[in-house]
Amino acid sequence: KNVQEWVEQQQSGQEGGGEGAPPAFLTRRKKSFKDTLIYQVVDHVSQAAKVGVAVIGADCLALIGKLMGNDHDLMDNFSRIFSKVAYTGWITHRLQAFKRYLLRNTLGKSKIELGKLNIIDHLLDGMIYSLWLIFLLDFLEVQTGMAVKSLFSVGATGTLVLGLASKDIASQIMNGLTLHLSEKMYEGDEVRFSDGTSGVIVKMGWMETMIRSSDELVVGIPNTHLSGQRVYNLSRTPRSQVKQSLRISYNDADKIPKLLEAIKEEIKEACPKLITDGSRAFRAYWQNYEDDHLAVVVDCHFTIKPTGDEYWSNRQNMLEAIYRAVKKTGVHFEKAVKS
C-alpha cells in the first residue's frame, strides 16, 4: 500500500511538473543481521552452550580418571575448577566486548578520539583480567583449599630467578603504559623516531609496538627502546617544508636576480597551498659562493601534511616550477664534480 501511494504521488508530481521525495521505508538503510538483537541473543546462547559442553566434557574426564583408580585430590576438584574458569572466562570475555561497544558509541570517530579509545580500552582490559585473576585465586584458596601463598612460596634462588626474569617484562609494560598515556602517537599515525626508524603504527601493545615501514615490512620494537626517543608524528603536522638547493654556473651570475623572481612567480602559480602570509618562510635567495658554482636556495612552506600522495605531488609541482623558471631565464645548472 505504501509503495502504491508513493507511485501515485510520483505520477501526479510529474504531471504537475515536480517530483515527490521517496518515502522513508525506501531510503532507510537495511540493518545487517549481525547488528540485530536476535542475532546477539542467539550468538550468546550458542557461546554459553559451547562452554557448557566443554564443562560436561571435563566432568566426563574426571569421572573416567576416578574409574581408572586415580583418587588424587586434584581429580576431585578438577571439574569444579574447570567449570569456574570456563564460565568466568567467558563472562569476562563478553564484558570486554560490551565495554568496547560502549566506548565506540561514546567517543567520536576522529583519529585522536579513536586513539584515546584504544588507550582506555587497554587499561580497562588490564583491570578486567586482573579482577578475573584475583577472583580465580580467591576461589582456589577458599573452595579447593589451595592457598594462594603456596603458589608464591618458592625458595630464595627461585625468587631471585623469578625477579630477574620478570624485570624486563615489567619494564616493557611500564614503558608501554607510558607511551599510551603520553598520547604522542596512536595506531595509524605515520611517525619518525630520532634513531631513524619510521613508518606507520600498526599496533601499540603493552610490551612492543608494531611499525610498518615504506617497504611494507612490519617490525616489532620493544617499548623500552622507544620510550626515551624523540617522536616526530607526521600525521599530526598540518604543514610541510620543501627546501631545495641549486647549483648555478658562474657564467649566469648576472641572471640570478631574474631567476629568483621567476622561481617565486612559478611556485605561486603551481602550488595553491603555498604559505605567503608571512607566518612561514617563502624564500628564493643567493646563498653563497662555492668553489665550482653559485649556491641558490629555495625554501617554501605549505599547508599540507608532510606525508602522503598530496605532499609528494605538491613537491613535484614545486620542482617543475623551479625548472620552468630556470628555462625561462636561460640559466644553466653546474654539475657536481666528483673527487
Image (tube, rainbow, N blue to C red):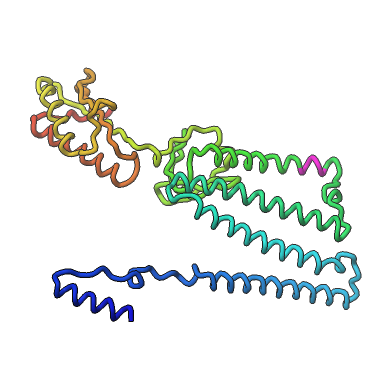
- Whether 239 is among the magenta residues is no
Q: Across the whole image, how many numbered discs are drawn on residues? A: 0
Vertical order, 289 against 154 (above or below): above
Rendered view: 208 above or below 133: above
Camera-side residue: 103 or 233? 103
- Could you tell me what secondary structure mostly forms the magenta stretch? helix
- Residue under the point 74% across and 62% down: 85
- Can residue 220 be seen at all in this image of the molecule? no
285 shown above or below 98: above
In-image side of 155 versus 193 (left or right):
right
Image point 25% across, 39% down: which residue?
A: 315
Quarter of the rendering containing residue 278: top left
| Left/right of residue 95 with respect to residue 106 in the rendered view | right
Residue at the extreme top of the image, as rendered? 289
Specify the segment rendered in magenta: 158-162
**x, y (%) of residue 139?**
81, 58
User: What residue sits 66% from the left and 59% below the top?
Assistant: 92
Across and down, in percent, residue 167 comes to 70, 39
- For residue 160: magenta? yes
Q: Position of residue 88 (x, y in %)?
A: 71, 62
Image check: 70 left or right of 227?
Answer: right
- Residue 70 appears in the rendering: yes
**Left or right: 264, with 138 as reference point:** left
Above-or-below relation of 188 to 90: above
Q: As rendered, which of 42 and 270 lies closer to the eye?
A: 42
Assign the C terminus to one quadrant of the image.
top left
- Which of these two is toward me, 224 or 336? 224
Quadrant in which the N terminus is drawn = bottom left
